[in-house]
Amino acid sequence: MIAFTFPGQGSQAPGMGDPWVDHPSWELVTEASDVSGRDVAKLLLEADAEELKETRNSQLSTFVLSMVALDAVVRTGVEPAFHAGHSLGEYSALTAAGVIDYADAVRLVTERGNAMQAAADAEPGTMAAVLGLDDELVALACSSTDGEVFVANYNASGQVVIAGSPDAIELASAKAKELGAKRVLSMKVGGAFHTPLMAPARDRLRKALRDVDLRNPSRPVYANVDAAPHSDGQEWASLLGAQLTSPVRWRHILHELSDAGATVFVELGPGSVLSGMAKRTIKEAKLLSVSTPSGVDQLLETLAGESHSGSGLEGEHLYANEKLIVSPATGVFSQSAQISAGTAISRGFLLGSVGANEVRSAFEGQFQGMLALEGERVTTSQPIAWLRAQ
């Protein structure tokens, strides 16, 4: 089974949008700019490393590029069985699973980035990666240090990130080395993320979440806070708020996904940081990343090979005779009539409407299922339904 995973802040890189400019999924960048009031294309194409490192810039640009990669993959008909995202990537996972509308997600990510930037400016902090030390001993290094320092990320076996005030980080790093850490690497970030020092950002984000409609996910989404899947959309308001001041339990999520049957981990967005973590944690997993359009081709080739080899991948529909019917516009989807799976439909068949725009099938074939919900706000080219072409 396939798990879609989404990276967080730190995966961004200058020019990361260049390969996507001529791809149909690039239209999501324009929509994000309109919603956020920021020039997202400029961030993805022209911003240098220093500008992208700013929290408000790195979060918005990483989220949007992840959505571009997701849209490109979804257009091919590949579907996951599970979703998960690291820190900021949790918003990508929730958008992918239909919990949050894309426009609402852009607004939330914009507010989250601004709020975390403000909290970091008010209470300067930093982070460091502790390598080669058990979780318990890293926690001990933090708890036995004077000052504010906490475990922020459980990333992979032997890779734990701590965060706090610069002085406390220095002391805790020395303590971790005394306890046997192989290395402690300072991270070039401007805040102590996922610690109590982000409480002002958490409170600000909770206010923004009150205005967002949170729906039940189409596929399980695993939360950073407890590494568990949550199927009730209303639970995510408190989970997203708590995430800002709680450690990211990514290693635990990877194990939970594996235990649930995930065998293929697809990282959607810039970089391949999550693939590296998964390689250290789930030795037998197949790891793929989609950060450019060529990554989509590689994904299809790999999954096709797996399918032909008889592995029986579950959670994706990758057959040459299956077709997607996509939205002609951005707006609220309304289904015209209930259609049973297996019903034969003709080219031009009316499935519903998106605002004033009709959604009609461009193919003949057997109807297989709806991919959009009644009343759901969809974006241009978002899959509405799928069928098996005749």
Image (cartoon, helix red, strand yellow):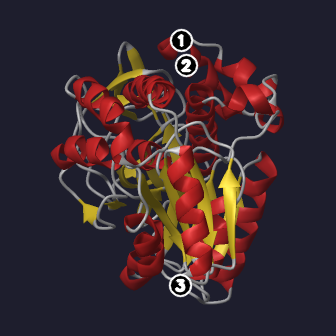
Q: Nearer the viewer, residue 151 or 103?
A: 151
Residue 332 vs 288, above or below: the answer is: above
Residue extending furthest toward the front = 146
In this image, 211 relative to 306: left or right? left
Q: Position of residue 43 (x, y in %)?
A: 71, 23
Q: Which mark is residue 312?
A: 3
Q: In the rendered structure, which amino acid carries the disc numbered 1?
A: Asp
Q: In the rendered structure, which amino acid carries the disc numbered 2?
A: Glu
Q: In the rendered structure, which amino acid carries the disc numbered 3?
A: Gly
Q: Nearer the viewer, residue 139 or 365?
A: 139
Q: Residue at x 63, y 29 (%)?
A: 54
**What secondary structure is marked by label 2?**
helix
Q: Which mark is residue 34?
A: 1
Quarter of the image with the C terminus in it: bottom right
Q: CA distance from mark 2 to mark 1?
A: 5 Å
Ranked by sequence position, the earlier of labels 1 and 3 is 1
Residue 15 visible to an observer of this rendering: yes
Q: Position of residue 253 (x, y in %)?
A: 41, 70
Residue 353 vs 96, above or below: the answer is: above
Q: Residues within 10 Å of mark 3 (few under 14, many from 20)?
A: few
Ranked by sequence position, the earlier of labels 2 and 3 is 2
Q: CA distance from mark 2 to mark 3?
A: 37 Å
The residue pinned by badge 2 equals: 31
**What secondary structure is marked by label 1?**
helix
**What secondary structure is marked by label 3?**
loop
Q: Nearer the viewer, residue 383 or 34?
A: 34
